[in-house]
Amino acid sequence: MRGRIIKESIDLFDKKGFSKTSIQDIVDTIGVTKGTFYYYFKSKQELLRDIHLNYIKELLKEQEVILNDEYISCKEKLNRLIYLIIKNIKVHGKSARVFNREVRHLDQEQVKSVNVYRKEFRLNLQKLIVEGKEKGEFRENLKNDIVIFGILGMVNRSYNWYNPEGEVSEEELVNIYMDLILNGIKLDANRT
């Protein structure tokens, strides 16, 4: 039942937004009483926190698998990590939108608990940039934290506009992002 409450709440939060979705809306959708809701969650905010934690913890598990693959380059790891986020738009689009859009509705302590994992995800990416610099795959003069904030800002905003069923495939979008990240938009006379 807990999983069903989470799933239906994600749908409702995605459609209506967190603040416009009531606990009554959630229980009506599932066909249970408020008592059932409160058996599993103390509040709607606690439910939202758990949605956030479930989402980011799953991303971290998948990130770890990619980062620990010693047979691929740092560039390829970065490519796969960007793809991980983009493919989640199709697979977990509603959860991703709720994760990125509704965090403002968590209280300070809940935000802290979620941000521990968000920070871990970001710092893991930062370590990848450092490793790539050490291996000569990335430029030495990069400011690691700003590069990662830029990458995450660009990629995470995709949840707001990207349509996986549209004319640009996930792979094409990742390739565009990787080209922007690795080469920028400056015309290079040596490129054909």
Image: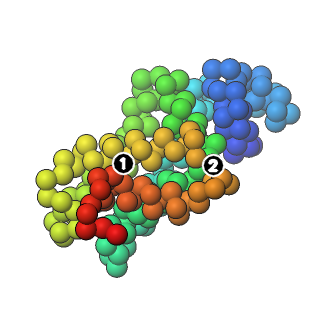
Instruction: Provide residue 141's location: percent of width, then percent of height.
Output: 13, 53
> What residue is shown with label 1?
151
Residue 117 in the image: state x and y as whole percent: 40, 44
Q: Secondary structure at mark 1?
A: helix
Of all residues shown, which one is farthest toward the right? 31
Residue contact at pointers 2 and 1, CB within 8 angstroms = no
Of pointers 2 and 1, the one earlier in the residue sequence: 1
Q: Which mark is residue 163?
A: 2
Q: Position of residue 175 (x, y in %)?
A: 45, 62
Q: State the residue at coordinates (50%, 30%).
A: 103
138 vs 143: above or below: below
Please say if 69 is above or below 115.
below
Give the answer, above or below, for where 39 lies relative to 68: above
From the image, which quarter does the N terminus lie in? top right
Does the image show residue 17?
yes
Q: Please state which of residues 165 and 188 is positioned toward the viewer in this rendering.
A: 188
Three-letter code for the amino acid on which mark 1 is drawn = Ile
Q: What crowding class fits label 2: few (fewer than 14 Cα within 10 Å), some (14-19), or many (20 or more)?
A: some
Q: Quadrant of residue 169?
A: bottom right
Q: Quadrant of the image for the C terminus?
A: bottom left
Please tell me which residue is depicted at 66% across the width and 34% down the height of the picture. Answer: 14
Q: Residue at x 57, y 26 (%)?
A: 45
